[in-house]
């Protein structure tokens, strides 16, 4: 069976195949120019689990998860679009739109049923809006203090000398101690309110999926230098550090909420690059549990299923902190037990071989609510595309079996050939 509405990929014209290395069905569900998924923490699934949102150079798209047909929901006609996330109370997609010739941006939403577009706020350039709360009354984001509600942003931060590496850029930025603000925006009247000011590098705000007044955020920077994960109430009260580092080169990061909002999960390494854990902090009990991962099982990002003991991960290449040449894959994890480091274990299954993927683009994998598919983005065929790998359900008998790695190499050879002919 071949899926309607799916563009043909370059490698042998395949739209779907069985990955020879894993035995799982892979589908290229979107191949518009630069089709991609938002950051791994964003909620991109509709309330009923029937559709997902992705982004391309053409605009914001709606993907039917039953048949993988796609629809252009918000065209990018002369504007820059940023997908924030789907609402959890209504069928609304929240996004930011900016005219390329203007210095302001608009915080908008579109109703998936009526297609009505609502304008919630007009903000100066420089605000970074990242999350919508559970009852869709607030958005949250960050801004540098040089940006004001009435004025225009100053020039963005640039180091004195061009950093040679990403690590040097992180050190330079965090040591600059630029005043910043964590902000919330009233979606009813557009009012902006600062809830926390700091010279720490504030980033990655995420509202709880359940508690509409609880926000998680991060202190960005070199992970072994910062106590990264914090929570705060939407009125600025009850600011709390979730994990305090206690040894040299200990790191935590890529934090995300459990699907029930009861816990915060995160990547924990103690020390960096040596011992790997998928950690969980329970907000009610204030207790931490952690399950150990092997170097090969480690992923850049993890994401939860509705089942609290099932996760997916997007793997890593040898350039990432685990330095493993066996990690490049989409992974399915099942946690066995849930008490402490010595009594938990995890089983990990490779779903898609991503040795042909360039991890400068992080795959940002996530499970569909029915646990039939894992969505991810990849550049295995050149420009970014959105893919799905089947977890459960019947697979048609006529789907060809192919090595995903060989298909990626073939696509690379085709691109080289085209370039040489130009």
Image (spheres, rainbow, N blue to C red):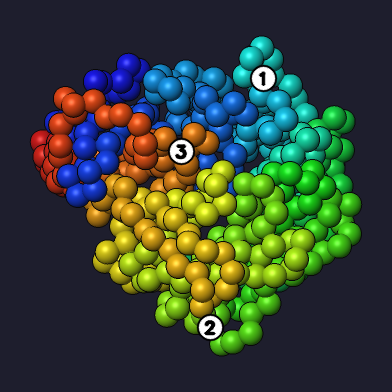
Residue labelled with disc 2: 249
Indicate the position of residue 67 as horizontal and vertical percent values. Answer: 39, 20
Q: Which residue is mark 1?
A: 111
Task: Please tell me whether residue 84 is drawn above or below residue 394 in the rendered image.
Answer: below
In this rendering, is residue 73 above or below 287? above
* Displayed quadrant of residue 158: bottom right
Q: As displayed, is residue 265 above or below residue 153?
A: below
Q: Is residue 139 left or right of residue 386?
A: right
Look at mark 3 in the image and give the residue it sits on: 371
Name the secondary structure under disc 3.
loop
Q: Earlier in the sequence, mark 3 or mark 2?
A: 2
Using the numbered discs, state the Cα–Cα distance from disc 2 to disc 1 in whole angstroms.
46 Å
- Picture layout, residue 93 above or below residue 126: above
Q: From mark 3 to mark 2, how far is it between C-alphas? A: 36 Å
The N terminus sits in image quarter = top left
Residue at 36% over, 50% down:
330
Q: SS class of the residue under badge 2? A: loop
Question: In front: 17, or 97?
Answer: 17
Instruction: Give the left or right position of residue 101, taking residue 215 as reference.
Output: left
Q: Could you tell me if residue 195 is visible in this image?
A: no
Give coordinates of residue 175: x percent, y percent. Answer: 64, 75
The alpha-carbon separation of the residues under discs 1 and 3 comes to 25 Å
Q: Secondary structure at mark 1?
A: strand
Answer few, some or many: residues within 10 Å of disc 1's Cα (few below 14, many 20 plus, some between 14 and 19). some
Nearest to the observer: residue 133 or residue 409: 133
Q: Residues within 10 Å of mark 3 (few under 14, many from 20)?
A: some
Percent x, y for residue 209? 69, 44
Quadrant of res 256 = bottom right
Is residue 310 visible in the rendered structure shown here? yes
């Amino acid at each position: 069976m071949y899926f309607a509405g799916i563009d043909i990929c370059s490698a042998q014209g395949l739209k779907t195949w069985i990955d020879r290395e894993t035995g799982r069905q892979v589908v290229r569900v979107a191949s518009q120019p630069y089709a991609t998924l938002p950051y791994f923490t964003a909620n991109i699934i509709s309330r009923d689990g029937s559709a997902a949102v992705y982004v391309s150079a053409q605009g914001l798209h709606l993907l039917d998860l039953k048949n993988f047909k796609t629809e252009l929901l918000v065209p990018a006609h002369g504007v820059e679009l940023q997908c924030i996330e789907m609402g959890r109370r209504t069928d609304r997609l929240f996004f930011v739109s900016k005219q390329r010739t203007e210095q302001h941006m608009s915080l908008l939403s579109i109703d998936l049923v009526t297609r009505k577009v609502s304008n919630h706020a007009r903000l100066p350039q420089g605000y970074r809006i990242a999350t919508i709360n559970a009852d869709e009354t607030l958005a949250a984001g960050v801004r540098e203090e040089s940006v004001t509600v009435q004025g225009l942003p100053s020039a963005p931060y640039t180091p004195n000398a061009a950093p040679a590496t990403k690590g040097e850029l992180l050190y330079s930025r965090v040591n600059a101690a630029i005043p910043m603000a964590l902000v919330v925006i009233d979606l009813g009247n557009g009012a902006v309110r600062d809830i926390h000011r700091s010279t720490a590098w504030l980033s990655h705000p995420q509202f709880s999926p359940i508690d509409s007044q609880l926000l998680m955020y991060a202190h960005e920077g070199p992970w072994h230098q910062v106590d990264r994960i914090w929570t705060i109430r939407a009125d600025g009260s009850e600011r709390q550090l979730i994990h305090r580092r206690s040894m040299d080169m200990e790191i935590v990061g890529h934090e995300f909420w459990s699907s029930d909002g009861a816990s915060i999960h995160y990547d924990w390494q103690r020390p960096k690059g040596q011992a790997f854990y998928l950690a969980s902090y329970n907000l009610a009990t204030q207790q931490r549990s952690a399950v150990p991962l092997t170097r090969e099982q480690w992923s850049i990002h993890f994401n939860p299923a509705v089942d609290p003991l099932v996760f997916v991960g997007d793997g890593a290449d040898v350039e990432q902190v685990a330095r493993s040449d066996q990690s490049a894959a989409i992974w399915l994890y099942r946690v066995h037990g849930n008490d402490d480091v010595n009594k938990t274990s995890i089983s990990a299954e490779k779903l898609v071989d991503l040795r042909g993927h360039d991890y400068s683009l992080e795959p940002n994998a996530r499970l569909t609510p029915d646990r039939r598919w894992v969505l991810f983005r990849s550049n295995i065929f050149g420009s970014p595309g959105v893919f799905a790998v089947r977890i459960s359900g019947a697979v048609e008998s006529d789907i060809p079996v192919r090595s995903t790695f060989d298909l990626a190499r073939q696509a690379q050879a085709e691109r080289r050939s085209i370039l040489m002919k130009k």
